[in-house]
Amino acid sequence: MLKTNPAFAASVKTASNFNAAACINCGSCTALCPLGVDLHPRTLFRYVLIGAEEKLLENTSVIYSCLLCRMCEDNCPADVPIAENIRSLRSYINRTRFGLMKG
Ligand code: SF4
Ligand code: SF4
C-alpha cells in the first residue's frame, strides 16, 4: 500500500524553488535524458506532488545520478525547471537523510 505524507511536498519546497505544477506528463524528459530509462523526472516530481515520500527516497541513487545537463529542461514543453527541481530533491534528501543544510 502506498503511504503518503501530506507535509512532504511543503518540506521539499522549503528553502528551494521546487515547482512541477506545470508538468503535463508528456515523457519528453525521459526520452531525451542521456541516462535513459533509469531517470524519470516526471515520476519523481509526481511522488512529491502526491506526498509519496517513501517512493521518492527509494530513488535516492537515481536522483544523485542526474548530470544536471538540462537536456530535458531545454526541451520541456511546459517549461518545468527540471534540473532545479532535482537540486531541490537532493537538498531535501541532504537535509532529512544526511543532516546536511544544502544540496
Ligand atoms: S518534459 Fe516537462 S512536461 Fe514533459 S513530462 Fe518532463 S517535466 Fe513534464
Ligand atoms: S538534467 Fe538530469 S534528468 Fe535532465 S537530461 Fe540531464 S541527466 Fe537527465
Image (cartoon, rainbow, N blue to C red):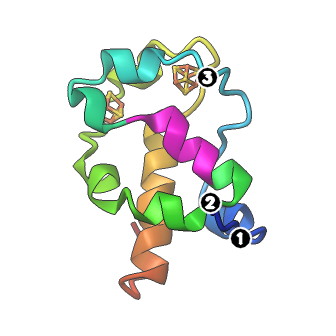
3 or 18, nearer to the observer: 3
Q: Earlier in the sequence, mark 2 or mark 3?
A: 3
- Amino acid marked by disc 3: Asn
Q: How packed is label 3: few (under 14 Cα within 10 Å), some, or many (20 or more)?
A: few
Residue at x-position 61% and y-position 22%? 25
Q: How packed is label 2: few (under 14 Cα within 10 Å), some, or many (20 or more)?
A: many
Q: Is 88 displayed left or right of 94 in the figure?
A: right
The residue labelled by disc 3 is 25
Q: Is residue 88 above or below residue 82?
A: below
Residue with the most extreme bottom position: 99
Answer with the quadrant where ligand 1 appears in the image: top right
Residue 97 is one of the magenta-drawn residues = no
The residue labelled by disc 2 is 52
Image-quadrant location for residue 103:
bottom left
Evaluate whether residue 87 shows in this view: yes
Instruction: Write down the region rendered in magenta.
Output: 40-47
Q: Earlier in the sequence, mark 3 or mark 1?
A: 1
Question: Does mark 1 have its CB less than 8 Å from ligand 1?
Answer: no
- Amino acid marked by disc 1: Asn
The residue labelled by disc 1 is 5
Q: Is 76 displayed left or right of 3 in the figure?
A: left
Image-quadrant location for residue 15:
bottom right
Q: Is 70 displayed left or right of 13 in the figure?
A: left
Find out whether the residues at labels 2 and 1 contact each other: C-beta distance under 8 Å: yes
Image-quadrant location for residue 21:
top right
